[in-house]
Image (cartoon, rainbow, N blue to C red):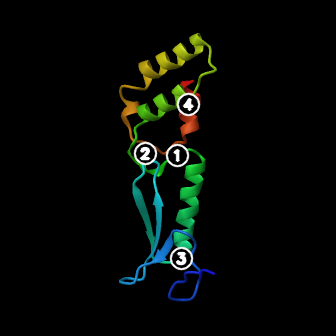
Amino acid sequence: MAKARKDNKGRALRKGESQRTEDMRYMYTYTDPYGKRRYIYANDLRTLREKEDKLLKDQLDGLDVYAAGNADLNFVFDRYISTKTDLRKTTYTNYKYMYDHFVRAEFGKRKIGRLSIPMYCIFIIIC
């Protein structure tokens, strides 16, 4: 039977968690949606697990943290509108027109990570 991995204080570590020997920081390893290996660091195990929980919640919500920080609003809107296959043609055209006419040129170039309002508010305003 496999032995449980533990940190230097004897606490059991979950899958993907480890403790670095050189500075005793905790590290969580995961693979992002693009197939690239990513790491999350924390000084204590509680903080690391809070960050893990936030990452899991974001992944379940369909947000990838990598794209959320680097993507602009135009990218997110185009991704969102491409999922709306059940809209009538006129509704789809109106959504695209309103976004292109009022949002895309200036506000749409802002990074998602820098916006302080929730995304659903933006889509409600646009649509």
Query: Left or right of 92: which side holds 35?
Result: left
Relative vertical location of residue 12 with respect to residue 106 in this rendering, above or below = below
The type of residue carrying mark 1 is Leu
Classed neighbour count for the residue bearing mark 2: other residues with Cα under 10 Å, few (<14), some (14–19), many (≥20): some
Residue at (53% x, 76% y) in the render: 45
* Placement of 66 over or under 10, stated as above or below: above
Q: What residue type is labelled 4?
A: Phe
Give the mark nearest the N terminus, 4 or 2: 2
Judged from the image, the secondary structure of the residue bearing numbered disc 1 is loop
Spatial CA distance of label 4 from label 2 is: 18 Å
The residue identified by callout 4 is 123
Query: Secondary structure beneath disc 4?
Result: helix
The image shows residue 125, relative to residue 117, as above or below, that is above
- Image label count: 4
Q: Do the residues labelled 2 and 1 touch (CB within 8 Å)?
A: yes
Residue 112 drawn above or below residue 7: above
User: Can you name the residue that lies furthest to the bottom here?
Assistant: 9
The numbered mark at residue 45 is 3
Q: Name the mark on residue 67.
A: 2
Residue 36 figure quarter: bottom left
Query: What numbered label is drawn on residue 63?
Result: 1
Task: Residue at the far front: name it.
Answer: 1
